[in-house]
Amino acid sequence: MASSTQIPRVVVAGGGSGAGKTTATVALIGALRARGLVVAPFKCGPDYLDPSYHARAAGRASHNLDGWMMGRDAAIATLVRGARGADIAVIEGMMGLYDAATPTSEEGSTAELAKWLAAPVLLTIDAGGIARSIGAIASGFAGFDREVRLAGLLCNRVGGRGHLDLLRAASADIPVVGGLPQNSAPAFPERYLGLFSANESNVPDESIAAWGRIAADWFDLDTILAIARAAPALPPAQAEVSVSEPTRPRCRIGVAYDHAFHFYYEYNLGLLEALGAEIQRFSPVHDSGLPQVDGLYFGGGYPEIAAPALSSNRTMLAAVRDFARRGGPIYAECGGLMYLAEGIRALDGSSFPMAGLIPGQAVMRDRLQALGYAEIETRAQSMLGPAGTRWRGHQFRYSVLEPPPPTEFERLFTVVPRWGGKAFGEGYRTGNVVASYVHAHWASNPAVAAAFVSACAGARDRT
């Protein structure tokens, strides 16, 4: 079993987006698990969907590692915590290996995280139509940054055993450690936010298992394990947040969790628990009312897909409105904001009334309305901390509030897009309700989670 610092690990990176790294990662996890190994999965970047596939294959939660939102120390500490009790950590990259915030820096890239984590890299290449050129590709990626240890290649869309043998012969410097043959298993379904979430209705167990069997047959698992086990001891993290486990819960926080709401960073939920919150999951779609809780957390997801069911669950909507009226702390992100708005308008023009706590309708568009990292600063004291509190997050949405809340409706946040764009006011607040389109990652400032827990504990004390 892996110790807290000596963790066998490997990064499955891509030559670019669409190279097949999610499929390769799921296949590798499944094959290793079939060998009896406990696999701890991770995902570089802010993605919520790929981790759902990892979790299905590994049988345990997948944790995000994000250089810009978390920083080096929190990334290392998250790897150590998430890999506790595991035999190997498998870390899926984001975009291409060296793709980053700018064309001239490594900030936010898979390569940066691989260096922070001292993790060897397996590069996934779309090898359809490629022969000797695989050697040039491997040499280019390996030589671009010598501090990144490119340890092997995974070749996607290979034409057969003969093609894979040819690729192995052509890549003399970087070994080809496996391939995924073309049309070998069902492709994972996709929708506008990327892949569908990997629940059993969208992705049957057999689909996950099929990729594991393919990897067991087409990957050199012994070599991959040797690469992972040769990773050095992890560098120390300097500034991990220190929280003591409470003897009893300070408060109970209801977390909306069903097919409409399931975009949460495991770090955030774990931090709430470490700070003394007992998490109570509930379904705004199926449950008739709220559990006995002191605060509510509505994450992102696909409320527009479940809009008819959410709207028709009038007892739940009434319970949420009553909770807000009584001053209960409610924090909502993206899909959560849509649920707390007056309604959701679908692409076909149909409208569905929602909680009505935030003015305006969440109107779906057929193209992205916002994408990218952002930094938030609060303009006033709130349940998230004092005025001037800062943290980092990410936006990825296809909806807008129309009409926007009136100017007199409080905007608690100043949101500054990370890479260009004008700062704007958001973070709509009414009473103890705060709702935003930005998905926060509290590793950037754990004090925000601590303030939210304290606000929920205070609400508990008043009842």
Image: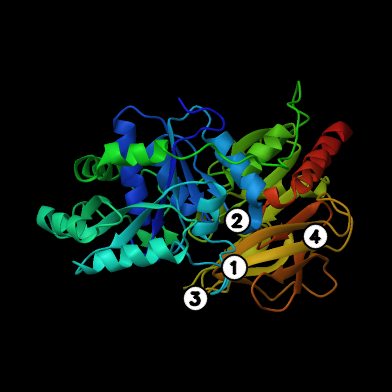
Is residue 316 left or right of 303 when viewed as pictured? right
Secondary structure at badge 1 equals strand
Quickly name the residue at label 2.
67
Residue 202 visible from this viewpoint = no
Mark 3 falls on what kind of element? loop
Q: Sequence order check: which comes first, mark 2 or mark 1?
A: 2
Mark carried by residue 429: 4
Percent x, y for residue 281?
60, 37
- Mark 1 lies on residue: 372
Earlier in the chain: of badge 2 and badge 3, it is 2
Q: In this view, does 202 lie to the left or right of 413?
A: left
Mark 2 or mark 1, which is nearer to you?
Answer: 2
Q: Earlier in the sequence, mark 1 or mark 3?
A: 3
> Hey, what amino acid is under mark 3?
Arg
What's the distance in space between the residues labelled 2 and 3, CA to CA?
27 Å
Task: Please name the residue that numbered disc 3 is placed on.
Answer: 367
Any part of residue 449 in sight: yes
Q: Residues within 10 Å of mark 2 (few under 14, many from 20)?
A: many
Q: Residues within 10 Å of mark 4 (few under 14, many from 20)?
A: many
Residue type beneath disc 4: Arg
Q: Which residue lies furthest to the left in this view?
A: 162
Give me the C-alpha separation between circle 1 and circle 3.
15 Å
Q: Which amino acid does label 1 sit on?
A: Gly
Q: State the separation of the CA atoms marked 2 and 4.
A: 29 Å
C-alpha distance separating marks 2 and 1: 14 Å
Tell me: residue 338, above or below residue 278.
Answer: below
Q: Which residue lies furthest to the top in this view?
A: 247
Q: Do the residues labelled 2 and 3 touch (CB within 8 Å)?
A: no
- Mark 3 Cα-neighbour bin, 10 Å: few <14, some 14–19, many ≥20: few
The numbered mark at residue 395 is none
Quarter assignment of residue 97: bottom left
